[in-house]
Amino acid sequence: MRLLSFRFGCLLACACFLSLTWITSLPRDEASAGSSVLPDLQTLHDRLLVAEDLGRQVSRDLSHILGQLINMSKDVNLTHSTSNTTNIFLIEPVRQLFGGQAGKGISQPNIYTYMPHLRRHPDSLVPNVILGQGRRGVSMVLGIPTVKRDKQSYLVNTLSSLFYSLTSSQSQDLVIVVFVAETDTDYVSSVADTIRNNFPKEVQSGLLEVVSPSQYYYPNFTSLRETFGDSKDRVKWRTKQNLDFSFLMLYAQDKGIYYVQLEDDVVAKAGYYNDMITFVTQQEPKPWLYLEFSQLGFIGKMFRTRDLPMIAEFFLMFHRDKPIDWLLDHILWVKACNPEKDAKHCNEQKALLKQRYKPSLFQHVGLHSSLPGKLQHLKDKDFAKQTLYNAHSNPVAELSSSLKHYQEHSLERAYKGEDFFWHQLFPKTTRFYYRFKTVGAFQNGLAEGEIEEALQPVSALRLVVHSNSDVWAVLSEV
């Protein structure tokens, strides 16, 4: 079918060309007939008008054929790629990608305008889908960009937190996309293996996807201009973050109704999914651009997926100039503020385009930033106001731990139902007593088991940590 379309296009182009040639050759034919009189100027003028009309028709026909050939080319490219792989930026008309129809009209901007290096590699905008089932049609998509860190990764803890409280129906109405924002194939594969090993059911069901960019997606960062007093490394870091968020947004735009931007070093409040769906349903009639479920940076920002192409294009347009959270605020300014009004009026109008949910549903826990050498002590104060523990009436017991707790969040208070146990996983070396019997292990943050009657009464209960980690851990229920 594609071959027939191509042949038809070629025949049509030839027919139009021959028609034009025949019209323009008429004066020569009359001269050869023996007429020594020059053609009437009016007749010549009329014939030229006919030729001009035919020329325009030829141009339109060739443009149409070009569009068909381009669409055929895209179909062939997508057929030869994996079933889950699509070019996330081929969403514009042909005239936009090629800057007008056969030289007529105005060239319109597209992603190649902002990232011209992408023109050199046809597959530079094709995402590498490593894990996933291509799930679509859900209510909410969570996007998590992750990068290689010098110290440690918080990604597994973040994902465990997100999966912990999901019901079966909620898991079917959600997609979590992890974007490994690196071009080092070995590192990308190692992250995918870690996720596959820790969350096999979530990957198999389609709840969890892992994607990475083409090796040609990122530009050369060495020519960036240093602005706002930022070092060259920081300018590169913030520029790449703009590109990472844009890529992830455009990949997720056709998967669901709402898109939520997260980071790879957060924890979620139990029941976050239901709280978010309830709130967005209440706010849906209002003209908001985004909803906030955390007060920190870009964490927990929810957008309608239909707005993502506009937002991503704005980020790409100014990706070299400013940090991502500044650019988001500039979108609000452009949409809401009147230059003839004062700053107070501007802030009031911007507030109408963003609605804040309290208390916060996501907390930042990473100590080491993805920017090498930077420590982050950011904490969302609104998140700390909610209850992070479940109290129980436990029997009197003697308690001890080799884990150092943070401030007043001790094991004793957690056991009494007064607080949660918050600590770092740096256990001291302890003796293993062989008379202990394993009755359960932690899976997705929960450990439970039954004790056989023959083993009762129980004289001691031991919780063993098998490895060290820089990530803070919370024991919320005993």
Image (tube, helix red, strand yellow):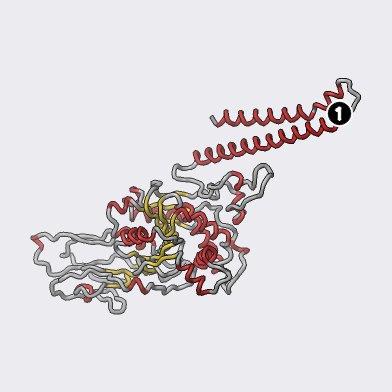
On the image, the x and y values in percent for residue 475 come to 26, 69
Q: Nearer the viewer, residue 132 or 88?
A: 88
| Extreme residue in the front direction | 42
Query: Eyeballing the image, is 45 above or below 145?
Result: above
Measured as percent of width and height from the top left, residue 57 is found at: 68, 35
Residue at point 60% right, 48% down? 96
The residue under label 1 is 39
Q: Nearer the viewer, residue 399 or 376?
A: 376
Instruction: Point out the image quarter for the C terminus.
Output: bottom left
Element class at badge 1: loop
- Give the residue furthest to the bottom: 407
Q: Evaluate whether residue 331 shows in this view.
A: yes
Left or right, 51 with reference to 430: right
Q: Position of residue 155 (x, y in %)?
A: 39, 61
Nearer the observer, 276 or 376: 276
Q: Is residue 237 visible?
A: no
Amino acid type at mark 1: Pro
